[in-house]
Amino acid sequence: MTPVLTAAALMVTAAGVLIALAVGAATRRLDHALPVLLDFLTAAGLIRLAADVSWHSILGAAAVLTVRKVAAFGLRAGGKPTERG
């Protein structure tokens, strides 16, 4: 991986953590902060993938995307009120 892309991926990851913490502190809601963090982690994974196209990088990016989709689904499903009859 080139040093520039390595630094860019690290900066995007750090920015994602900081911004997600800020969103979480401002809204006090995990369902708002977690998607922000996962979007930044997705971006960092894609930057890493651009630098080093290997099976390890592809699996890492796929893992981040899978976690993002599962977490987003869980937040949507968990946020719905249940009707009791």
Image (cartoon, helix red, strand yellow):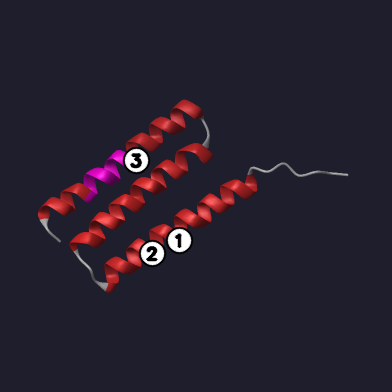
* First in residue order: circle 2 vs circle 3: 3
Report the side of 79 relative to 70 (left or right). right
User: Residue extending furthest top?
Assistant: 26
- 7 drawn magenta: no
The residue located at (23%, 48%) in the rendering is 10
Amino acid, disc 3: Val
What residue sits right under mark 3 in the picture? 17
The x, y position of residue 57, in whole percent, is 28, 66
What residue sits right under mark 2 in the picture? 62
The x, y position of residue 25, in whole percent, is 44, 29
Report the side of 77 relative to 23 (left or right). right
The residue located at (40%, 63%) in the rendering is 63
Query: Relative to 56, is 61 above or below?
Result: above
User: Residue extending furthest front?
Assistant: 50
Q: Which residues are magenta?
A: 9-16
What residue sits right under mark 1 in the picture? 66
Query: Relative to 2, is 53 above or below?
Result: below
Amino acid, disc 1: Thr
Q: How many marks?
A: 3
The residue located at (15%, 61%) in the rendering is 1
Report the side of 27 relative to 19 (left or right). right
Disc 2 to disc 1: CB gap under 8 Å: yes
Q: How far is the residue under mark 2 from the one under mark 1? A: 6 Å
Disc 3 to disc 1: CB gap under 8 Å: no
**Element at badge 2?**
helix
Amino acid, disc 2: Ala
Report the side of 74 relative to 33 (left or right). right
**Element at badge 1?**
helix
